[in-house]
Amino acid sequence: MAKEGVLSGIAGWRFGVFPIGAVATGAAVGGLGDAVSGLVQGFIPAVPSWVVKFGMAFMAFQWLPGLVGTQAAQMGGLFLTYDGVQELFNIRGSVSNIVGGITGKVVKQSPPTFQGASDPYHSLLDRKG
């Protein structure tokens, strides 16, 4: 039997038919990948964030199952893959345009999650004195 990771016990929690534990642990793994993506973007802004997200998803699928558990790693990888696809193809913007065309209403789109050097974290680092 393969050794399961530290989050495998939590990942097995269910509420009826809903895999609450798998979603929660996957969100934790995905959040960690998102944080690493933000760090990479902060130091190497030329690399598109979707590239980093796909790289983090690959790492989650390949190397994290033994560390955090198979379900947590797969859910985290799926979250990161979805995030990368969303950033690459701007699915929300496309759906918003389609809905706006059908209804005649402009749907407000949320701003991107990372603003590069204009985000508050970097503005604190850029201060002198």
Image (tube, helix red, strand yellow):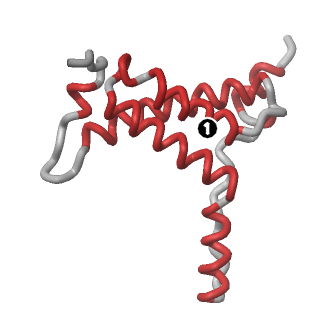
Rendering coords of residue 106 (x, y %): 67, 78
Across the whole image, how many numbered discs are drawn on residues? 1
Dot 1 falls on a residue whose secondary structure is: helix
**Tag 1: Cα neighbours inside 10 Å, few (<14), some, or many (≥20)?**
many
* Residue at 38%, 24% in the rendered image: 65
Residue 22 shown left or right of residue 129 in the figure? left
The quadrant of the rendering that contains the C terminus is top right
Rendering coords of residue 107 (x, y %): 63, 73
* Residue at 53%, 40% in the rendered image: 80
Residue 44 shown left or right of residue 71 in the figure? right
Q: Which amino acid does label 1 sit on?
A: Phe
Q: From this viewpoint, which residue is outermost toward the left?
A: 16
Does residue 12 lie above or below 8 as drawn?
below
Rendering coords of residue 45 (x, y %): 81, 31
Q: From this viewpoint, which residue is outermost toward the front?
A: 1
Q: From this viewpoint, which residue is outermost toward the right?
A: 128
The quadrant of the rendering that contains the N terminus is top left
Q: Nearer the viewer, residue 113 or 76?
A: 76
* Residue at 73%, 35% in the rendered image: 119
Does residue 30 lie above or below 112 as drawn?
above
Q: From this viewpoint, which residue is outermost toward the top?
A: 129
Residue 14 shown left or right of residue 41 in the figure? left
* Residue at 48%, 35% in the rendered image: 30
Q: Name the residue under label 1.
A: 54
Q: Nearer the viewer, residue 30 or 118?
A: 30
